[in-house]
Amino acid sequence: NTEISVFDLSDDDSLLEDEPTRTFIPDSACTDGPNIGLIKEGVLVDTNADGCLDSVHYTFTVTNTGGSDLDAISLTDFILFGNQDIPGPISESITENDILEIGETWIYEADYAITQTDIDNQSVVNQATVSGEVMNTEISVFDLSDDDSLLEDESTRTIIPDDACPGDDGTPLYGIAVIKTGEGVDADFDGCDDSINYSFSVINSGILNLENIVLDDELLGGTINELVNTEQTEDGILQPGEEWLFTATYNLIQEDIDGIFVDNQAIVTADIVDSSDSILDRSDDNSYEENDFTSINVSNFCEFIGGGSGFQIFNGITPNGDGMNDYFKILGIENYPDNNVKIFNRWGVLVYQTDNYGQGSNLFFGISEGRATLQSERELPSGTYFYILTFTSDENPGEESYSGYLYINRD
């Protein structure tokens, strides 16, 4: 019945001593920490079905082998796309949430065109790299590929036979490349650049015909359809050495100007004719052989008329059918369908009006077509006009109405 207490610190091997217990952990020990594994396998294929092996078809298996979900997955292979990510994963292998969950596997595929050097060396040997981040942290994981195991890091060796077929005269059997350039333009003719006109040159750099050419640019909203039509484009086949030109306009937002530079990159994809294989390239700013971002300095460009974020009014149109600035553009107007637009000429005569502007094809292309206009359905001449934009409900981008000058240039 006393309050006397006793205590002891642990020892590793004696009841009479008090030394810490030390346990050595080998490098090969398994943990539940974050981890990722990569297998790269290659098989020879006959891309153009001419009876001669011409390519290595690679399959990449990426697996979350750790105890944490991963995102920001990046897969690179220098011989395929340099330091650029390999596109994918293929749709059948992803849960479409951009998260590589614990135990989940993603599959990527890509083709490599055999060269004469590969035949001389009798093999293609290299490794790919995969990396990722633990969700909601800055913890990164990475792995070098192995040829058959998620736990090893050996290079993948694909034997190339003497009778394999490289491209002619050193030209790859198949290839595509794109150059993206941009220049500032004054869309509203007020003496200050407010947009970037981009030009894309796409070339078939191989010796096989290509079809289903798709040019995609996230900055410009996805697929770019403004192909400059020529005799070469009529058949829909991008032949060896042939170049196709695309154009698109990007209207700047204030965040672009605040950031000083607009940097981005386009991707072009194509199918090899009479084959199930596809190829791609990421754009460069001046070379078909490289993959650098296109960077435009916009620090001296105009500021904008507009309300809330993502809403801007552009004050100039050039309705000449070239796909650039052909209509009165109000960025974000589709989010505020309860609106009315009126356009007047310099004498105050109403030449155009409509409700629900910006919904579908309800746009002003420089044609007078309002109910109260004079000479309806007439092509309006070049000159200065005045617009009034009114929002007829409580939903608006910041103001109930906007007004200003609009310039039509048909020259």
Image (cartoon, grey):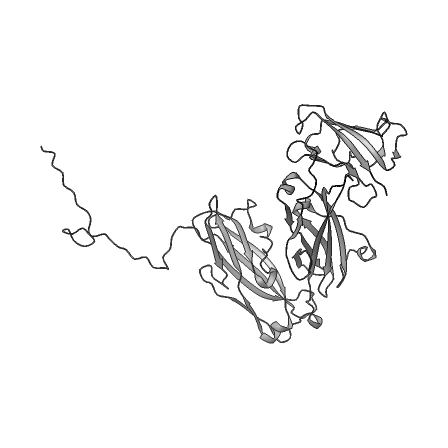
Answer left or right for 258 relative to 244. left
Residue 79 on image: x %, y %: 59, 64
Q: Is residue 231 above or below residue 251?
A: below
Pick the front one: 380 or 121 = 380
* Callout count: 0
Pick the front one: 210 or 132 = 132
Answer left or right for 324 relative to 83. right
Q: Is residue 43 above or below residue 70?
A: below
Answer left or right for 192 relative to 411. left
Q: Quadrant of residue 354?
A: top right
Residue 105 on image: x %, y %: 51, 52
Quarter containing the N terminus: top left
Residue name at image x 16 percent, y 53 percent? 14
Pick the front one: 195 or 281 = 195
What is the residue that sits farthest to the top in this orientation?
393
* Res. 173 visible in picture: yes
Residue 203 on image: x %, y %: 73, 59
What is the residue that sits farthest to the right in this orientation?
375
Residue 257 on image: x %, y %: 65, 42
* Res. 273 visible in picture: no
Quarter containing the C terminus: top right
